[in-house]
Image (cartoon, rainbow, N blue to C red):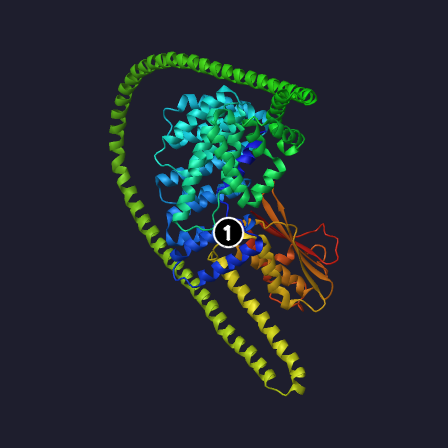
């Protein structure tokens, strides 16, 4: 039940970011058009409205990337309000990924302090709490409730407004997961008051509260409070709609949100008057006429017409719908209402067969419901008893502490008197020691002179060491400058040689071109090999001098692998199959890492396989270990393999299996060093039986 309610509420929240109803092709065409507009803008600030439109219209699977792009643009412009807005939308979008929600919370904490930031942090924490409570073991929830009630009762006066909201929301979420009784209602009311007293009125925070409160009040048989919560939710949706219209957000649509609120309010029709019932149902029909999703939901579940017909006491029309929906698995949680309504309609129509069927079904459900409520009330009373017992023990401990403090003060007084006596004795001893020290002072004068001379010697030695250190640093700097200058001086003529050799081939007679093309290809390959050696030397120098910087950010795993595959294609022997096996074709996983360094490691590993594979295949794939929070890339080839005992030697600097092999022997060494900087590792998979070899590259995500 908790998982259903929490999921329903989070879906309702995510729908508050829904876009206008378009098919994929229409969305793609509009997104492409908006991206072309972006290319003509001059400043990042001008692109924010268009990026908002792209975010609004993008499908749910790609909306996260659009949101991160918008966040980064707002970050460059220093627009804190937009940053907080899109971070709130991202935490709602990623309702089941607590790692992404934690990232959003961390990003919020980096922004300047303000009431909006504090309110946004609270919203992000509450969303993360919803996910954590849903996934928590049931047996731990009761103890957690006791702990939360005790902490809140003892500390609520000292809590800030935001901490109080967080504590109450956590307590209500745990109570709703365990028992939905009077205790939940009391704390839910207190939570609503606490949110209203916050210094910053954040729509997202109020929306989260009313969405949860409406579900909880309804399930707790408190329709009046549930209706009021839905009315407040409608005000928020209406406010958001007006705000988006003023800002020109033409791709935002709230039809589904209005539909959900009106439909669920009709379920509590006993608290509505006749005009409200007719008005809400009329609005539902208007929404269904213009929205295919709403129309399909009404045809499948028939909840809205079922609630409306029962509210209007049109029993002959309602009864067939009630019979169908009693068998609909989508309405399992509403069967108590359905069977009760069936019984009411059958009695009004004097349908004895249906009355018997409804009575049997309703009695069974009611029996289960009463048993559940009894158990919940028992658990609630047990919790209150345990908390009161804990308060009693705390009072007893407080009394004992007061007695202990009194005894402590008495002990301190006695100790002070003893200390005074000891001080008098010490004063006498110090006077005697002073007389002795005075005599020793004369002897220490000569020793002091010797120490001063030793100090001067140490200072001179220190000066020599500083000069030697500065000389070593200067030599190291000259070495780095020499490597950088030489790499530039070598790369320029290399490029010229490659271009000139190709120019000669392009200007030769067609009969001789095929002959010379082979030599031009040798020149290009040799130039690429030399560039690789130069780049490897530069990377080694950067790592040794701690100048290689790791910059982590969310990165697509699929994009990393595709870039590595495309980069290595020209170096693969003819006839060798170069493959990327994607284990997550239906989704695009993201990791938080330095994509340039990961690409560099993957390219080096693939290039190493290409050197030793003349036929067969080279395969790249990956596996994400969610428990260990790591990702492992695997590069497998059908080449010559690695001799036994050489699995670690090949990672040493300048080490090669054969002196005839191309390369400088630095590639695998650089891979291992970069992996270490990423807190990961690169190794040979010794369990792989062949043919060829398999390298494993593991990093934390």
291 vs 463, left or right, is right
Q: Residue 520: x, y in percent?
A: 62, 79
Q: Residue 552: x, y in percent?
A: 49, 51
Q: Quadrant of the N terminus?
A: top right
676 vs 397, left or right, is right
Q: Is residue 240 visible?
A: yes
Instruction: Looking at the picture, tell me which residue is in the foreground, 599 or 611.
Output: 599
Q: Secondary structure at mark 1?
A: helix
For the point 47% across and 27% down, the residue is 273
497 vs 648, left or right, is left
**Up-down relation of residue 162 to residue 665 (above or below):** above
Instruction: Looking at the picture, tell me which residue is in the foreground, 210 or 113.
Output: 210
Instruction: Looking at the picture, tell me which residue is in the foreground, 266 or 661.
Output: 266
For the point 75% across and 53% down, the residue is 689
**Up-down relation of residue 513 to residue 177 (above or below):** below
Q: How many marks?
A: 1
Specify the quadrant of the image occupied by residue 322. top right
Q: Is residue 670 visible?
A: no
Instruction: Looking at the picture, tell me which residue is in the foreground, 384 or 285.
Output: 285
Q: Residue 451: x, y in percent?
A: 31, 45
Q: Residue 129: x, y in percent?
A: 50, 34
Q: Which residue is mark 1?
A: 57
């Amino acid at each position: 039940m908790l998982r259903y309610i929490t999921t329903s509420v989070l879906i309702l929240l995510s729908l508050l970011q829904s876009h206008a109803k378009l098919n994929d092709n229409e969305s793609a065409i509009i997104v492409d058009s908006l991206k072309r507009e972006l290319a003509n803008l001059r400043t990042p600030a001008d692109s924010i409205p268009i990026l908002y439109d792209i975010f609004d219209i993008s499908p749910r699977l790609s909306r996260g990337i659009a949101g991160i792009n918008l966040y980064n643009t707002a970050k460059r412009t220093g627009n804190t309000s937009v940053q907080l807005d899109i971070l709130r939308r991202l935490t709602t979008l990623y309702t089941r990924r607590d790692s992404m929600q934690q990232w959003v919370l961390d990003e919020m904490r980096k922004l300047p302090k303000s009431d909006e930031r504090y309110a946004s942090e609270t919203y992000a924490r509450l969303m993360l709490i919803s996910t954590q409570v849903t996934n928590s073991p049931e047996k731990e929830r009761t103890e957690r409730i006791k702990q939360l009630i005790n902490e809140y009762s003892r500390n609520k006066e000292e809590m800030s407004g935001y901490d109080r909201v967080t504590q109450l929301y956590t307590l209500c979420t745990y109570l709703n997961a365990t028992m939905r009784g009077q205790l939940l209602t009391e704390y839910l009311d207190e939570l609503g008051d606490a949110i209203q007293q916050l210094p910053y009125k954040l729509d997202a925070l109020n929306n989260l509260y009313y969405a949860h409160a409406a579900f909880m009040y309804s399930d707790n048989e408190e329709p009046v409070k549930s209706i009021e919560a839905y009315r407040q939710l409608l005000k928020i949706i209406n406010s958001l709609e007006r705000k988006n219209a003023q800002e020109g957000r033409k791709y935002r649509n709230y039809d589904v949100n209005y539909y959900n609120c009106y439909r669920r309010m009709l379920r509590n029709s006993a608290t509505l008057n006749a005009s409200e019932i007719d008005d809400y149902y009329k609005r539902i029909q208007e929404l269904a006429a213009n929205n295919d999703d709403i129309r399909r939901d009404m045809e499948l579940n028939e909840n809205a017409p079922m609630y409306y017909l029962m509210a209007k006491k049109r029993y002959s029309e309602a009864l067939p719908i009630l019979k169908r929906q009693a068998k609909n698995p989508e309405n399992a949680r509403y069967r108590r209402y359905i069977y009760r309504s069936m019984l009411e309609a059958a009695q009004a129509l004097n349908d004895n067969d249906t009355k018997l069927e409804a009575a049997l079904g309703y009695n069974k459900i009611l029996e289960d419901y009463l048993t559940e409520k009894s158990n919940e009330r028992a658990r609630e009373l047990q919790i209150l008893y345990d908390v009161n017992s804990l308060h009693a023990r705390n009072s007893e401990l407080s009394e004992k502490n007061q007695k202990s403090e009194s005894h402590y003060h008495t002990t301190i007084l006695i100790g002070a008197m003893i200390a005074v006596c000891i001080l008098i004795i010490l004063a006498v001893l110090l006077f005697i020691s002073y007389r002795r020290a005075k005599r020793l002072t004369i002897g220490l004068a000569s020793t002091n002179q010797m120490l001063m001379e030793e100090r001067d010697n140490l200072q001179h030695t220190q000066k020599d060491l500083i000069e030697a250190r500065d000389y070593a640093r200067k030599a190291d700097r000259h070495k780095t400058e020499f490597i950088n200058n030489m790499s530039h001086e070598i790369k320029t003529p290399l490029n010229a040689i490659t271009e000139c050799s190709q120019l000669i081939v392009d200007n030769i007679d067609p009969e001789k071109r095929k002959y010379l093309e082979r030599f031009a290809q040798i020149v290009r390959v040799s130039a690429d090999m030399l560039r690789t050696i130069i780049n490897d030397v530069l990377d080694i120098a950067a790592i040794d001098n701690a100048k290689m910087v790791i910059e982590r950010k969310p990165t697509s795993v699929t994009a990393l692998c595709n870039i590595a595959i495309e980069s290595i294609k020209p170096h693969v022997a003819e006839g060798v199959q170069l493959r990327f096996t994607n284990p997550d074709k239906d989704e695009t996983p993201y990791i938080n890492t330095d994509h340039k360094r990961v690409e560099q490691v993957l390219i080096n590993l693939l290039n190493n396989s290409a050197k030793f594979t003349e036929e067969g295949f080279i395969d790249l794939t990956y596996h994400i270990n969610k428990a260990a929070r790591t990702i492992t890339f695997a590069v497998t080839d059908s080449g010559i393999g690695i001799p036994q005992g050489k699995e670690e030697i090949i990672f040493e600097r300048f080490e090669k299996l054969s002196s005839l092999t191309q390369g400088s022997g630095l590639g695998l060494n650089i891979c291992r060093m970069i992996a270490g900087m990423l807190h990961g590792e690169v190794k040979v998979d010794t369990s792989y039986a062949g043919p060829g070899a398999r390298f494993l590259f593991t990093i934390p995500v």
